[in-house]
Every structure is written in C-alpha cells, then in structure tokens.
C-alpha cells in the first residue's frame, strides 16, 4: 500500500503528497485540480525571487529563509522543506558563485581549503536530520538564526570602519595561510578602492567550518549563515569576500547533503523546480548589486533577516513541543 498524507496546514494551498514507490521520489496531487498545482508552483517561484536576491546579497544559500517559508507559510513538514531547500541551494548557488568568480571577489583557495571539513559535516548532518524529531530541527535552526543574526547586527558598523582604515591589510597572517597563499585582494565598487586582506586563525576556521557543514546537512541551509561569520569574524576576512567565497563553497557543501536526501526519496521535484527557478532569478539580480552596497549595510540586513526568521522557527518549535503559541507568530 502506498502511504500518503496531507502536508499543508495552509488552507490556501491544500497540497496532498503521496509517496511514489516506483521511482522513490515524492510527487504531489491536488485537492483542487490542475489549476491549483500550477498556481502553487507559480506562487513559489515568485515568492522565491526576493529570497534569491537577499541570498546573493548576504552570502547565504537561501535555506535559512526557504525552510521557514515552506514550513510556516506553505505548510510543508520540516523534513520535506529541508530536502527541497538543500537541492535548491545547490542549483541556485551555482548562479551566485559564477557571478562572484567573474567579479574576482571569491577566494577560491580558501574555499577549497575549508570545504574539507564542511563537506564532511554536511553528510553527517543530513544523516542526523532524518532521525531527529521535527521540533528539534525547528529549535536548532531557530537557535542558529537568532544567534548569528544578533551577532551580525551588533558588529555591522565595525566592518565599515575596518575597510575605511585598511585594517584587513594589517592583520597578522598565520603560517598556514602564508604557506597556502590564502590571503588576497578585491575591488570594492562601493568604496571605489582595492581592498587587500590577510587570513589568520586558519585552523580555527577549518574546525569551525564543521559546524557550518552540520547545519547545512541537518537544517537544509547552505551553511552561509555560519560560513560568512566564521570567515569574517574568526579568520578576519572582509565580509564581501566571505559572502562570495561562501557562495562558492555552498555548491560543494550542499551537494554532499543533497545526495543523502535524494537517495532517501525525500525531494519533491515539482516544488523543488519552482523554488529553484525563483531563487536563480533573484540570485542573478543580487549578485549584480552586492559589490555596490556598503559592507556594514550587508551585515545589518543579514542580521535582521536571520533574527526575524529565527524567531518564527522558534515559535514553531515551541508550539510543536508544548502546544504554546508565542506572541507575533
């Protein structure tokens, strides 16, 4: 017998998912006919355009917003939302990464170096996610989002000052960074200047990146919410370089986790296709804008968005666990 269940709690999008045992993927049926299927896909694609724009601007894969949107507003179970999100991050990340590579902002050497730990973490995280209760995933994602969001808001002004006073050039380059030639430079269009920087705390950044990988695989995010702060705060890399390098790494990190979800038959290809389309359109716009925006504005925007969605996910997790509704959620 083919198990099926109604996913959506949203009356505007009553979607019925059914497990297809023949090809081991999720397909969905409509309660309201073919028009509802088209409407849902179209709505998803449109909603995801600004998400893609923001993701490109602040160096995230979009999963930190995609997962809350799919669960809170479209009524999908979090594990299905995570699976769709991680596949979307891979596909859309290529768009953002290619643009930043063309602008020569991405630090390719650093990205490949950090991927040694993030890819391992992503695979472990995906395996863990399939066995954890849904409310745990909600609470974990909420914790990550709120902490990183508030941190970015607090440190937003500091970034502009460091760029202005050329502080990134004066940082002590550690032995590993010097040996691997990880330091670099880029042209900052907003500041109308070439910004040179040196990499430090390389080992700390490498081990910290494991947590970014775990978050990616477990929570359906690209890991950019952690990768950008790790590179910026721990390794003392300018936030724009961290954003661009994060997008480059994201494709590799999320791919490892995506393989696990695809193998488990968790990815709904219909919804994933619509999500990818919207995200990619937004990414194309966002990558053109990012280098023209002052760095402190990017950090403040990232912080506000993450903190807001973190609270929404916290409210969802608390409700799932205890039945208590938090205000404003």
Image (cartoon, grey):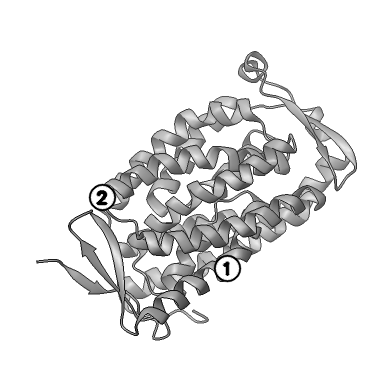
Circle nearer the viewer, 1 or 2 = 2
Camera-side residue of 52 and 293 = 52
Mark 1 Cα-neighbour bin, 10 Å: few <14, some 14–19, many ≥20 = some
User: In the drawing, what numbered circle is on residue 308?
Assistant: 1
Image coordinates of residue 136 in percent, x first then y, are 34, 60
The outermost residue toward the top is 179
Q: Quadrant of residue 74?
A: bottom left
**What kind of element bears circle 2?**
loop
Q: Residues within 10 Å of mark 2 (few under 14, many from 20)?
A: some
Residue at 45% across, 62% down: 67
> x, y (%) of residue 19?
22, 63
Label 1: element kind: helix
State the residue in front, 146 or 272: 272
Residue at 45% in and 58% down: 141
How far apart marks 1 and 2 lie (CA) works out to 31 Å
Residue on which the image places disc 2: 264
């Amino acid at each position: 017998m083919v198990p099926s269940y109604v996913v959506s709690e949203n009356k505007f999008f009553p979607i019925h998912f059914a497990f297809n045992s023949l090809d081991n993927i999720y397909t969905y049926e409509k309660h309201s006919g073919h028009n509802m299927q088209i409407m849902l896909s179209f709505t998803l694609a449109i909603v995801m355009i600004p998400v893609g724009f923001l993701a490109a601007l602040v160096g995230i894969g979009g999963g930190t917003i995609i997962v809350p949107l799919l669960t809170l507003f479209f009524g999908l179970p979090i594990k299905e939302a995570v699976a769709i999100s991680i596949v979307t991050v891979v596909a859309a990340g290529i768009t953002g990464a290619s643009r930043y590579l063309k602008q020569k902002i991405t630090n390719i050497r650093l990205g490949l170096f950090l991927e040694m730990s993030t890819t391992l973490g992503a695979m472990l995280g995906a395996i863990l996610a399939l066995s954890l209760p849904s409310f745990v995933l909600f609470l974990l994602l909420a914790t990550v989002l709120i902490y990183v969001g508030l941190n970015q808001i607090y440190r937003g002004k500091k970034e502009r000052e460091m760029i202005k006073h050329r502080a990134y050039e004066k940082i002590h380059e550690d032995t590993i960074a010097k040996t691997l030639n990880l330091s670099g430079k880029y042209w900052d269009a907003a500041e109308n200047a070439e910004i040179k920087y040196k990499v430090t705390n390389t080992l700390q950044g490498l081990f910290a990146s494991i947590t970014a990988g775990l978050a990616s695989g477990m929570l359906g995010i690209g890991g950019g919410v952690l990768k950008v702060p790790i590179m910026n705060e721990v390794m003392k890399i300018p936030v724009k370089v961290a954003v661009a390098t994060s997008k480059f790494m994201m494709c590799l990190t999320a791919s490892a986790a995506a393989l696990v979800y695809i193998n488990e038959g968790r990815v709904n290809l219909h919804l994933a296709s619509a999500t990818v389309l919207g995200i990619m359109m937004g990414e194309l716009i966002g990558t053109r804008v990012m280098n023209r925006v002052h760095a402190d504005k990017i950090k403040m925007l990232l912080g506000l968005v993450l903190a807001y969605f973190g609270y929404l996910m916290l409210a969802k997790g608390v409700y799932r666990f205890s039945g208590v509704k938090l205000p404003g959620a």
